[in-house]
Image (cartoon, helix red, strand yellow):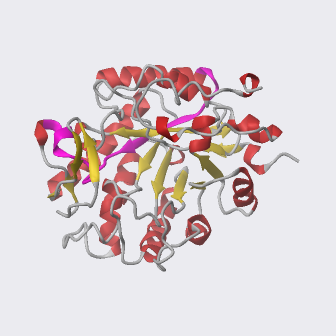
């Protein structure tokens, strides 16, 4: 009997060859004008045996930039490179979604057009530092977004989804996790607004639902996914009751028939936070009727268990896909796994990017 992870799966019009997803992972190699690195096509093609590839976070506009050297898809040069990447992935029988990203307050004025301060739901400065062209700098206090700013951001997500479609992606993944702009609206710790976008849970969910609805005017619902992180405290995030907040979000998402919702398992110690579920996918499964992707700290054994129990329909692997471009084949024959080199995750050249050995070169 074939292991559950290696069984095929129908995601809308796409028949995925297995249920293994290459997770979206920042690699910080877009050194020139946020254009994908020349090696990016090789990087993604090497991993096209995954049932679904999701790109690293891709900035929806210059105003969404939060880090150096991550790619965008809002200029002709960026789009030209993405089209080449997508075409090459398709030649290798891969299915690839583009992740749409706006970092909100997790940014720095020196990275933004005209050195403008970042904008966010509320003017709350995050703890921590960000790497800039001048070196490490403390985060700044963001400017609270006006209603017009919010409407503009929604349209930027919609426009970015058009661009993704134009260059040939098979779908889009909305980055709503890890303390970036969408997550900042969802969570009570970063959203202190008193208007229609703040206060009640319904109001705090309005921004993400407007983004979903606008993107569904561009894409078929099964070609759209949303990534969320209910138990994450990364980037100085907090919520009064994440169980209540995110169960409400998932229940509201049921009407849209999305391709999937990706749930991030905790990646920090939250044992002293009783309102934060320790097993995210298992806790939130009852609230959502559609496909779930489980992500973070996944193993072959856990992935198979989550699929067998119908907790998740797909399972995403991050660092294991970085170091094992042929991960499905390694799982299939129970081969040894390459160990990822964390020092090469961000920035750099081919080393730690496209030079991990395949099985036939790993004797």
* Residue 186 percent coordinates (x, y): 35, 65
Q: Is 157 left, or right, of 272 in this rendering? A: left
| Whole-percent x, y for residue 318 in the image | 56, 44
Q: Nearer the viewer, residue 230 or 31?
A: 31
Quadrant (top left, top right, bottom left, bottom right) of the C terminus: top right
Q: Is residue 176 visible?
A: yes
Q: Residue at x 51, y 41 (%)?
A: 342
Q: Residue at x 27, y 66 (%)?
A: 190
Residue drawn where x is 55% and y is 25% of the image: 354
Count of labels in the image: 0
Q: Position of residue 196 (x, y in %)?
A: 23, 69
- Determine whether, in the image, residue 258 is placed left or right of residue 113: right
Q: Magenta stretch?
A: 91-113
Tell me if residue 341 comes above or below residue 38 in the rendering.
below
Residue 217 visible in image? no
- The residue positioned 36% from the left and 28% from the top of the image is 30
Q: Is residue 92 found inside the magenta-colored segment of the image?
A: yes
Q: Residue furthest bottom?
A: 274
Left/right of residue 271 with respect to residue 294 in the rendered view? left
Please state which of residues 264 and 206 is positioned toward the viewer in this rendering.
264
Relative height, residue 335 to residue 278 (above, below)? above
Q: Does 153 sit left or right of 20 as displayed? A: left
Q: Is residue 19 or residue 26 the one in the foreground?
A: 26
| Extreme residue in the right direction | 1
Q: Is residue 338 magenta?
A: no
Q: Closest to the observer: 353 or 58?
A: 353
Seen in the picture, residue 171 relative to 249 is either above or below; the reply is above
In the picture shown, does residue 16 fall above or below 361? Answer: below
Please tell me in which quadrant of the rendered image residue 330 appears. top right
């Amino acid at each position: 009997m074939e292991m559950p992870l290696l069984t095929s799966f129908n995601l809308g019009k796409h028949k995925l060859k297995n249920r293994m997803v290459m997770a979206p992972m920042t690699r910080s190699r877009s050194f020139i004008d946020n254009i994908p690195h020349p090696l990016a096509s090789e990087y993604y093609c090497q991993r096209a045996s995954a049932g679904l590839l999701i790109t690293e976070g891709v900035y929806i506009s210059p105003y969404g930039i939060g880090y150096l050297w991550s790619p965008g898809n809002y200029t002709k040069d960026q789009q030209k490179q993405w089209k080449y990447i997508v075409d090459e992935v398709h030649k290798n029988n891969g299915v690839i979604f583009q992740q749409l990203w706006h970092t909100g307050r997790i940014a720095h004025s020196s990275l933004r057009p005209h050195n403008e301060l970042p904008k966010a739901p509320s003017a709350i400065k995050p703890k921590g530092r960000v790497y800039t062209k001048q070196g490490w700098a403390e985060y700044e206090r963001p400017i609270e977004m006006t209603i017009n700013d919010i409407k503009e951001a929604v349209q930027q997500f919609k426009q970015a989804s058009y661009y993704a479609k134009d260059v040939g992606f098979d779908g889009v993944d909305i980055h709503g996790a890890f303390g970036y702009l969408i997550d900042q609206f969802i969570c009570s710790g970063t959203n202190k607004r008193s208007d229609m976008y703040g206060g009640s849970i319904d109001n705090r969910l309005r921004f993400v639902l407007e983004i979903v609805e606008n993107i569904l005017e561009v894409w078929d619902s099964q070609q759209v996914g949303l990534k969320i992180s209910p138990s994450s405290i990364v980037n100085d995030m907090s919520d009064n009751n994440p169980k209540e907040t995110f169960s409400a979000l998932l229940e509201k998402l049921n009407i849209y028939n999305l391709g999937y919702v990706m749930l991030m398992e905790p990646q920090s110690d939250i044992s002293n936070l009783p309102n934060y579920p320790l097993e995210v996918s298992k806790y939130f499964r009852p609230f959502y009727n559609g496909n779930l992707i489980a992500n973070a700290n996944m193993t072959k054994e856990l992935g198979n268990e989550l699929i067998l129990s119908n907790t998740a329909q797909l399972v995403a692997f991050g660092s294991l896909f970085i170091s094992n471009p042929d991960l499905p084949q390694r799982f299939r024959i129970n081969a040894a796994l390459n160990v990822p080199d964390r020092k090469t995750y961000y920035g750099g050249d081919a080393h730690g990017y496209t030079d991990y050995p395949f099985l036939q070169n790993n004797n």
